[in-house]
Amino acid sequence: MRYYVAPLEGLTGTIFRRIHHRYFPGADKYYTPFLSPSHDHVFTKREKREILPEYNEGLPVVPQLLTRRAEDFLWAANRLFEMGYPEVNLNLGCPSGTVTAKGKGSGFLAFPEELDAFLAEIFAGAQGPVSIKTRLGIRDPEEFWPILECYNRYPVYELTVHLRVQKDMYRHPVRGEYLAPILAQSRNPVCYNGDLIRPGDLSALTNSFPGLEAVMIGRGLMADPALISVLQGGKPLERTTLRAFHDALYETYAQAFDSRRNAMLRMKELWFYLIHRFEGAERYGKQLRKASDPRDFEAAVERIFTELPLRPETVPGW
Ligand SMILES: Cc1cc2nc3c(=O)[nH]c(=O)nc-3n(C[C@H](O)[C@H](O)[C@H](O)COP(=O)(O)O)c2cc1C
């Protein structure tokens, strides 16, 4: 099985990837949160910090692009291949209103003819392997069959399927019943994504689908940064390693942003998930969420780490 870290905007940027890989090595790939290549074909400073090879040295990183203009995709993808990336991913899954209103992300799935023309152009012009991350459709998962037929016409390096439709956002239960027919009908290799949170979720999946070769994990890994190591047979999350990882991440953000406050805000995004790995999280979770001064945040973190036991596994409450 190959294990990929899902792209999570606001969570899995370059600093997270580096520090996560240092404390919890083992992920086969880290997908970057999406970059939107602009019409003027220059990477912004912020984008360069995500994708310049020096920020990703020694890490298996796959940059992700979000656009509906083939010309912009090809410009960015081919620069990324020149930088040495072995794969570039296309985002056809983002459900956020600001993205879908422009017909991008999962919004592109509503325009099958345009999508087909876009794919024809990018697969003809890309100088390296292009993978796709997709949802099943906009409103109804049955929309996926013609979309899958369209993907089948192209040499998609890997098709990661997040088994939800756009209107499901992130909460609706994953449409698990669609995995078997997708595996049967996809001509391209399939990677499963959606709600793998505890080790048992993966065993249930592989028992039903022994041929499955790759999974992508997002929120479950934010709650338990050791999850991939555990799935690979490593030891469960330990408090001391988690604390060391947490502090390294916080201090590196503080240095990079030159602001403990901004570092705290970034860490709160992680704590939104991580808190569910602790017993009795309600006790200090609120204090942590409400902290506006980094010293209050640090005090809440200290209490969580010294007073709350780790749960044997994540109990998702997001
Ligand atoms: C906060 C947040 C940010 C996300 N950002 C991205 C993104 O930049 N690109 C993308 O393809 N998916 C993004 N996703 C979707 C995840 O990659 C993933 O498909 C989804 O969370 C389901 O997997 P999980 O249940 O393992 O988290 C995001 C999800 C969340 C919750």
Image (cartoon, rainbow, N blue to C red):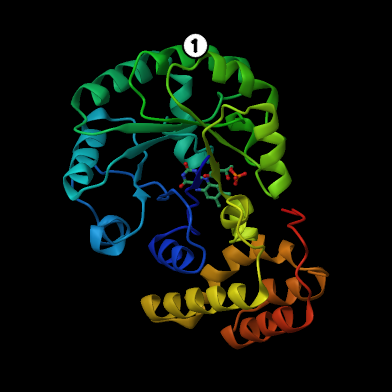
Q: Position of residue 191 (x, y in %)?
A: 51, 33
Q: Quadrant of residue 253?
A: bottom left
Nearer the observer, 203 or 104: 203
Looking at the image, residue 207 sits to the left or right of residue 77; the answer is right
Nearer the observer, 263 or 32: 32
Q: Is residue 78 visible?
A: yes
Q: Position of residue 144 (x, y in %)?
A: 55, 17
Say which amino acid is labelled 1: Pro
Q: Quadrant of ligand 1?
A: top right
Disc 1 is placed on an element classified as helix
Residue at (57% x, 26% y) in the render: 211
Residue at (63% x, 20% y) in the render: 180
Q: Is residue 13 above or below residue 188?
A: below
Q: Which residue is mark 1?
A: 146
Nearer the observer, 121 or 305: 305
Q: Is residue 37 above or below residue 26?
A: above
Identify the residue at the far front of this view.
233
